[in-house]
Amino acid sequence: MRHACMLPFTEKQIVTTGDYCETYSSKLPTSILEQIHFTDKLSKDEVVMAPSLSQCSWLMGFTQSLAPNRILELGTFTGVSALAFYEATKKNLAEIVSMDMSEKYLKYAEEAFRRHGATDRISTIQGPCLETLPTLTGQFDLIYIDAAEEEYEAYTRYILDNKLLSSRGVILVDDVLLEGLVVDQSIAKNFPEEIQEPYLAIADKMNAFNSYAASEPRVTTIMIPIFNGVTQIMWK
Ligand SMILES: C[S@@+](CC[C@H](N)C(=O)[O-])C[C@H]1O[C@@H](n2cnc3c(N)ncnc32)[C@H](O)[C@@H]1O
């Protein structure tokens, strides 16, 4: 059997591999490229919250295959992933609801949605996810969890308990490997000293979420070692 991950790369090789994957993938729509370009001009701490070009391509492909009618996103940020959902559902015209507690980021995202004519299907809600989730009605076929890592378990429990996920729906949870910290705490030494402890605390919470998701009896859980770790959750 092969190892789950076969790429023991240096930082430089990771960048080169990303570029290589981008070269040999279909070009992303202009709306996404422009919004990534916009996001890249924010501070270093903010830039890392946006998905890579490869992750956008993968999200689009996944979404297109699933053909969801309604999509829910927890964590809009500057709107890159919401635009990926929008572009991937141009045939079936999915409704996309995206929430974020940051007024600043929602303003950036909403400006982009307007610029790219996407407000016909993307709506945003401002507020903490745990307060916003109870305001939602109906079901979603794709739910993308990408907000506060320490709340992932609470989001998932709420979604399942309240049947926000449709019977054929999929929850995608981003960042479940947390830069590898959930499997090897020594990776923390690669980060600036002042964020090592908070990151390790988040890794503990993420570990707790990962064990919860794997043992939740109502769903099938698949953790995939791509990007920063993605878990796919579906009803049994
Ligand atoms: C990783 S970014 C989302 C990236 C976005 N999904 C994308 O791929 O382009 C996380 C976002 O979640 C938001 N956020 C963090 N904690 C939150 C919470 N408790 N409730 C709502 N939004 C939250 C942050 O403001 C930030 O914009």
Image: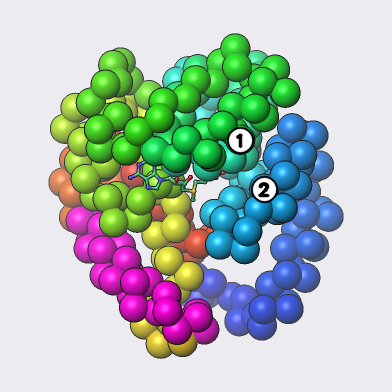
Which residues, given as a range, are shown in magenta?
190-213
Q: Residue 172, image x and y in percent?
A: 42, 43
Q: Mark 2 or 1 closer to N-term?
A: 2
Numbered tag placed on residue 108 in the rendering: 1
Q: Residue at x 42, y 65 (%)?
A: 177
Residue 117 higher or lower than 219, as above or below: above
Q: Residue at x 36, y 82 (%)?
A: 185
Residue 100 higher or lower than 52, as above or below: above
Q: Is residue 177 magenta?
A: no
Q: Residue 19, image x and y in percent?
A: 78, 62
Q: Residue 180, image x and y in percent?
A: 45, 73
Q: Amino acid at mark 1?
A: Tyr
Residue 86 higher or lower than 235, as above or below: above
Q: Is residue 157 left or right of residue 89?
A: left
Q: Residue at x 75, y 58 (%)?
A: 21
- Residues at marks 2 and 1 touching, judged by CB atoms closer than 8 Å: yes
Q: CA distance from mark 2 to mark 1?
A: 9 Å
Extreme residue toward the front, this view? 104
Q: Amino acid at mark 2?
A: Thr
Q: Is residue 165 left or right of residue 194?
A: left
Picture mark count: 2
Instruction: Indicate yes or no: mark 2 CB to ligand 1 under 8 Å.
Output: yes
Residue under numbered circle 2: 39
| Depth check, front residue: 104 or 215 | 104
| Depth check, front residue: 122 or 89 | 122
Q: Residues within 10 Å of mark 2 (few under 14, many from 20)?
A: many
Q: Quadrant of the C terminus?
A: top left
Give the quadrant of residue 90: top right
Disc 2, SS: helix
Label the magenta part by its dominant secondary structure.
helix
Q: Residue at x 26, y 42 (%)?
A: 156
